[in-house]
Structures are given as C-alpha cells and as structure tokens.
Amino acid sequence: MEAKKVMILIRSAPYGMATAGEGFRALIGLASMGIQTHVVLADDGVLVAHKGQAPEALGMHKLEDAYSQLADFGARLYVHLPSLTKRGLLKDDCISVEFISDEKLRELIFEVDHVITFN
Amino acid sequence: MENLYLVTRSTFERTAWQLAARLAKPGDTVCFIQDAVLAVNGPKELRGKLGELESTGVSVKYLAEDLAARGLSAPQEKVINYDGFVELIEKSKRIVS
Amino acid sequence: MTIGFLLRTGPYTSQNVDTVYHLAKRFLAKGYQVRMFLYEDGVFNLAKEIQSPQERNLAGMMAELVRKGAKIRGCGTCAKFRGLKMADIIEGTKLAGIVVFSNYLKECDRFLSFGF
C-alpha cells in the first residue's frame, strides 16, 4: 500500500452542522497516518477560518483553534478565495491559511488521488 | 475522462452546484443525481452556465432512475442509468461531490 | 478495481444510502472490491434491529452487500457518541477507527463521499 494524497473539502460552516468538526477529526486521523492531506475550505466552510470565533457559550470546541494546528500534523490548509469574498469576508479576517483561486483549486484537485467531501 | 463532479442536492435550494460549475473543465463530467436532477428545470442561472460548459466540452449527465422517480425527464443523450453511472465512475480519475 | 464510499447520513433520512447501495451492488457484480466507511449518523445504517414493515430494509441491504463481498466498517467514535454498540450492528461489519478509513483510501482506485 502506497501513501496517498488526499484533499479534504470542507463545505459547511462550523457549529450549525457537525460537519466541520467531524471533518476535522477525520482529517487529523488521516494526516497522522501518513496520508498527505490538503484541507480546502470552500463555500460556507470558509467560516472555519474566520478569526474571533467564541463558541464557548454553546459548549462547543473552537474550530478556529483546531484548524490552526493542522500544520503541526503535516496537513496544509487552504481557503477558496471566491467563496470567502462572496460571504463578505477578507483575507485579514482569517487565521493563517493559503488563499486559492478556482484555477489553483482545480490544479490541487489534479494533484491528489481522492477528494473527500464534508458538506 | 478526467474528473466527475457529482451534485446531489436540489439546485434550487442549495448552491453546491456552483462550485462544480466553476471547476469543471473540458473532459470533465458534471452529473446530477438525487434531488439535484431538479437541475433539468433550472434555476435559469444554472441552465445558462451548463450551456456554456457543454459548449466547451464538459459533459452534463442526469441519473435516469432519479429523474424517473420524480417524474422528470432530460434529453436522451444526457441521461444515464445506474449501469452508465458505474461506468462513469470507473472512467473518472476523481469524484468530487 | 477497488471502489470506496464515505457515507455520513443515517437510514431513512436521505437517499444517500440507497445511492451507495445501488452503486456498490453493481460494482460487486462486476467483480470489483467495495469498501465502505460509515461516519457520523451513517453508523446507524448498520443497526441490526432495524425493522421496516412494507419498506426496503436498509440494514438488510447493507448485509446483502457484505454477503457479496463488500467490507463495511462504522466509525467507532461516532457509534459511541450515538450509543450504538458492537453488539447492535449487523454480522460481518465492525466498528473501527480512522486508521481503517485511512487504509481504505490507500486501497481504493475511486472514492465517493456522501454527506449533506
């Protein structure tokens, strides 16, 4: 079995759905098992990278902090810029990520073996 | 065959189809299944975009069983049944949903 | 060829499990390998006590895929969070960790995700 390259595409905003949180649990597992993991936040998923989240009153974990640790696990984190812009957010509103265009996202899809979607 | 973009949710209720439409390139296929077969009726913005994509060589397909279940239809050449869907998956390098 | 599925939705909630079943059945009939990882509410598709008078039995359909050679595993942590135990799931399936999901990704030539 050879190690694979995988893209995890997160398309849901945090907290309303468990998707971004459960996606994180899966992708951390994959990254720590030697799978080259590229995490792309697109559509409402860009909210995961939004700075200043405070879900403590909801009794939930802060996903902004969780996703900030991705680099420690060898995974790369990207935000689809057109999705961010469409939601009225700026690059400065985000935690440290790489911003990608449609073209770059398409190139990244061509680089990986599988695209796993959390929508 | 390159990548298969799979759309499953209603194209009226949800905007998931837009990412597929933005990313699909000549040689790719955009396939509508489940409630996404409503795409045969729109919305208008989607119909326009699909027309553009098809003119550049993107293939657009609808799953026959999901159309029939909802009493909908699409032009014959754009309809695939489950066996065709299986072949499409085999031929596609990646499936993006 | 080996085909993998990630299924994140539960039974009798969305068409996802049906779509996965109809595809998997055909891939198995062609002699392909099928791997399925059930995540989040997807683990409930394995509940062996599912009874569905006058309706398709989704756990039965999962069991049929297992009999035909599919490897199906449910996420153990997801099951724990939902109060589902190993004893509650259909024969031939297991609860497992992300390591199994990771291995499926390595084995598969094609991989499909079904969520919301």
Image: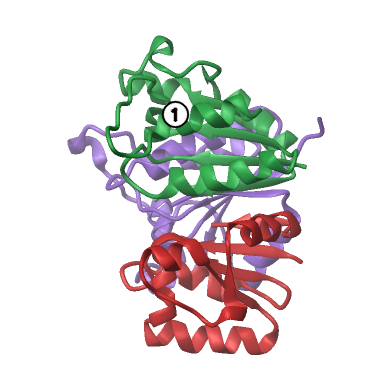
- The location of residue C54, given as percent across then percent down, is 28, 38
Q: Residue at x 49, y 49 (%)?
A: C19
Quadrant housing the N terminus of chain B: bottom right
The kind of secondary structure element at disc 1 is helix
Which image quadrant for residue A111? bottom right
Please identify the residue farthest to the front as the structure is shown. Answer: C54
Residue situated in front as seen by the camera: B34 or A89: B34
Q: Which residue is mark 1?
A: C60
Q: Is residue C26 left or right of residue C109?
A: left
- Residue C28 visible: yes
- The location of residue A45, given as percent across then percent down, is 42, 55
- The location of residue B45, given as percent across then percent down, is 41, 86
Residue situated in front as seen by the camera: B25 or B8: B8
- The location of residue A54, given as percent across then percent down, is 26, 43
Which image quadrant for residue C102? top right
- Residue A38 visible: no
Label 1 crowding class (10 Å Cα cut-off): few <14, some 14-19, many 20+?
some
Please identify the residue farthest to the left as the structure is shown. Answer: A57
Q: Judging from the image, what is the letter of the chain drawn in green?
A: C
What's the colour of chain B in the image? red
Q: Is residue B76 left or right of residue A45?
A: right
What's the colour of chain A in the image? purple
Q: Residue at x 54, y 47 (%)?
A: C22
Q: Residue at x 67, y 44 (%)?
A: C27
Please identify the residue farthest to the top as the structure is shown. Answer: C87
Which image quadrant for residue A6? top right
Dot 1: chain letter:
C
